[in-house]
Image: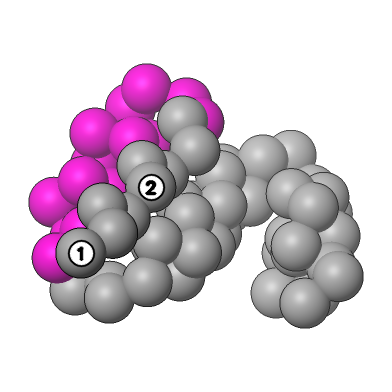
């Protein structure tokens, strides 16, 4: 069986907070997107839509 890769590290307090919800996500990519969503929410971005958050965190290719 292949061991799943570890999620990419972000800001420490976001990683620690989101770790509480990790078992809700079957795929590591979904868990990373969850963390990036939190980073986008605390950013100084104007008009925080999901599309704008995805663009600033690099998820706009999905």
Left or right: 6 in relation to 35: left
Q: Position of residue 19 (x, y in %)?
A: 21, 46
- Mark 1 or mark 2: which is in front? 1
The picture quadrant where one finds residue 54 is bottom right
- Is residue 7 found inside the magenta-colored segment of the image? no
Q: Position of residue 39 (x, y in %)?
A: 56, 44
Q: Quadrant of the C terminus?
A: bottom right
* Mark 2 burial class by Cα count in 10 Å: few <14, some 14-19, many 20+: few
- Is residue 16 found inside the magenta-colored segment of the image? yes
* Mark 1 burial class by Cα count in 10 Å: few <14, some 14-19, many 20+: few
Relative to residue 4, is residue 60 depicted above or below? below
User: Residue at position x 37%, y 22% from top?
Assistant: 12
Q: Secondary structure at mark 1?
A: loop
The picture quadrant where one finds residue 46 is bottom right
In this orientation, which residue lies closer to the viewer: 2 or 14? Answer: 2
Q: Secondary structure at mark 2?
A: loop
Q: Position of residue 38 (x, y in %)?
A: 49, 52
- The residue carrying mark 2 is 5
Q: Which mark is residue 1?
A: 1
């Amino acid at each position: 069986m292949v061991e799943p890769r570890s999620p990419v590290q972000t800001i420490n307090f976001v990683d620690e907070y989101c770790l509480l919800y990790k078992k809700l996500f079957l795929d590591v990519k979904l868990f990373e997107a969850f963390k990036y969503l939190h980073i986008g929410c605390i950013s100084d971005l104007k008009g925080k839509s999901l599309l704008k958050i995805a663009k600033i965190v690099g998820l706009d290719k999905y």
